[in-house]
Amino acid sequence: MEDILDQISKVKRDKLGTDIPILIFRVLRHYTNVYASDLLGEKASNILFINAGKALGEALGQRLYDEDINKYLENISKFVEDEKIGILKITHLDDNKLVVQLDECITCAGMDNIGKRICFFEVGLVAGLVENYLGKRVLAQETKCNANGEGTCEVTVNFG
């Protein structure tokens, strides 16, 4: 069976290519969140985005895996930037915790301060990547967000 990344990455758009404007991405994301919140409640909607990101992170983690943690993180950072999700920077790594900064975040870079953190997909993505590498569950949370007026997005993962 073909893996989900292979399936969803097949694109036949000879003239238009594979890129879409951030505006379209954000509209789809916003209205998916609005309708999911209406149907399931806001917390359930956030969990939906976290789980989607986590599923992608786990699949990517298998594809990008390298025993050398620094090489693995380099592979991930390159993928995130190549796919225009953002610019991923490792700001802290020790035996118990990883902190990554996501500049130019696809979800919220340039948005006005709306007073809350909204990058649930990105939190799930980072959690899935770390869980794949460590082979165990971790606790990840967004600790900064452009949409909360904090100037960057940041995900903190506790695993120790």
Image (cartoon, rainbow, N blue to C red):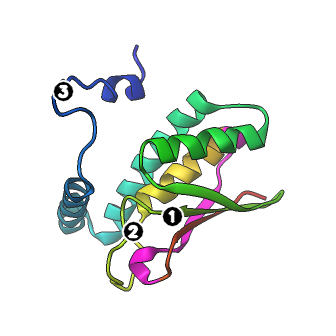
Could you tell me how far apart the alpha carbons at marks 1 and 2 are, in whole angstroms? 7 Å
Q: Are marks 3 and 1 in contact (CB under 8 Å)?
A: no
Q: Check disc 1: other Cα within 10 Å, few if <14, some if 14-19, many if 20+.
A: many
The image shows residue 57 at horizontal and vertical percentages of: 52, 42
Q: Is residue 83 visible?
A: yes
The image shows residue 50 at horizontal and vertical percentages of: 43, 56
Type of amino acid under label 2: Ala
Could you tell me how far apart the alpha carbons at marks 3 and 1 are, in whole angstroms? 29 Å
**Is 32 or 91 nearer to us in this picture?**
91
Q: Is residue 135 visible?
A: no
Type of amino acid under label 3: Arg
The quarter in which the N terminus is drawn is top left
Instruction: Report the side of 101 relative to 24 (left or right).
Output: right
| Mark identifier at residue 13 | 3
> Magenta segment range?
133-149
| Mark identifier at residue 103 | 1
Q: For mark 2, give the secondary structure.
A: loop
Membership of 135 in magenta stretch: yes
User: Which residue is depicted at the point 50% across and 46% down?
Assistant: 80
User: Which residue is depicted at the point 41% across and 29% down?
Assistant: 5
Tag 2 residue:
109
Q: Is residue 17 above or below residue 44?
A: above
The image shows residue 16 at horizontal and vertical percentages of: 17, 34
Q: Is residue 39 above or below residue 1?
A: below
Q: Check disc 3: other Cα within 10 Å, few if <14, some if 14-19, many if 20+.
A: few
Q: Quadrant of residue 40?
A: bottom left
